[in-house]
Amino acid sequence: MTGNGTGDTEALREEIRRTRVELGETMEALAARADVKARLKESAEQARERMREQAAQTVARVRGQAARGVGKAREQAYDKGGLVRAQAQQKGEMMRRNPVPWAAIAAGAVATVVVLMIVRGRRR
């Protein structure tokens, strides 16, 4: 201790000031914990933010899958289109080389029309 006691007094005052600051911080923390409405509001905001993030991730994932699906469907359609074109060319070539079956079908159709006309003519 010093002879006049001012050193101890200053140290004591500084200790009281620190204690008051710590006490104020502790009181603020306790008040924040006791404020249920504010805590619920903060918790709800955090939950909303998590849901937004999850929704954004889900949308991005679904869009990616859809884009891959569209690409695959286009590829398959292009492949099928090529196959159909090739088959049509083959059928066309076969018809050019052998037109007899089509001529027989056409003759049968003409004969059917003639028979129908005759039958109708007799009914009148």
Image (tube, rainbow, N blue to C red):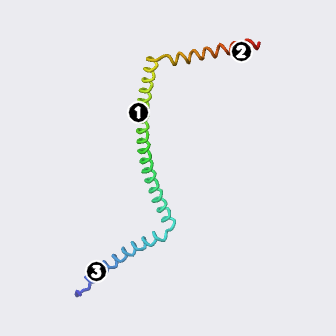
Q: How many marks on residues?
A: 3
The numbered dot on residue 79 is 1
The correct choice, above or below, for 14 with respect to 48 in the image is below
Which image quarter holds the N terminus? bottom left
Label located before the other in sequence (1 or 3): 3
The type of residue carrying mark 3 is Ala
Position of residue 45 relative to residue 59, above or below, is below
43, above or below 84, in the image: below
State how far apart marks 2 and 1 are (Cα). 50 Å
Label 2 – label 3 distance at C-alpha: 130 Å
Three-letter residue code for mark 1: Asp
Distance CA(mark 1)–CA(mark 3) = 89 Å
CB-based contact (under 8 Å), mark 2 and mark 1? no
Q: Secondary structure at mark 2?
A: helix
Assess disc 3: are there few (<14), some (14-19) or many (≥20) residues with their C-alpha within 10 Å of its C-alpha. few
Viewer-nearest residue: 44 or 106: 106
What residue did someone put label 3 on?
A: 11
Q: Amino acid at mark 2?
A: Val
Residue sitting farthest toward the right: 124
Question: Where is mark 2, residue-wise?
Answer: 119
Tag in front: 2 or 3: 2
Mark toward the start of the polypeptide (2 vs 1):
1
- The crowd level at tag 2 (other Cα within 10 Å; few <14, some 14-19, many 20+) is few
Residue positioned 42% across, 48% down in the render = 61
**Dot 1 lies on which element?**
helix
What SS does tag 3 mark? helix
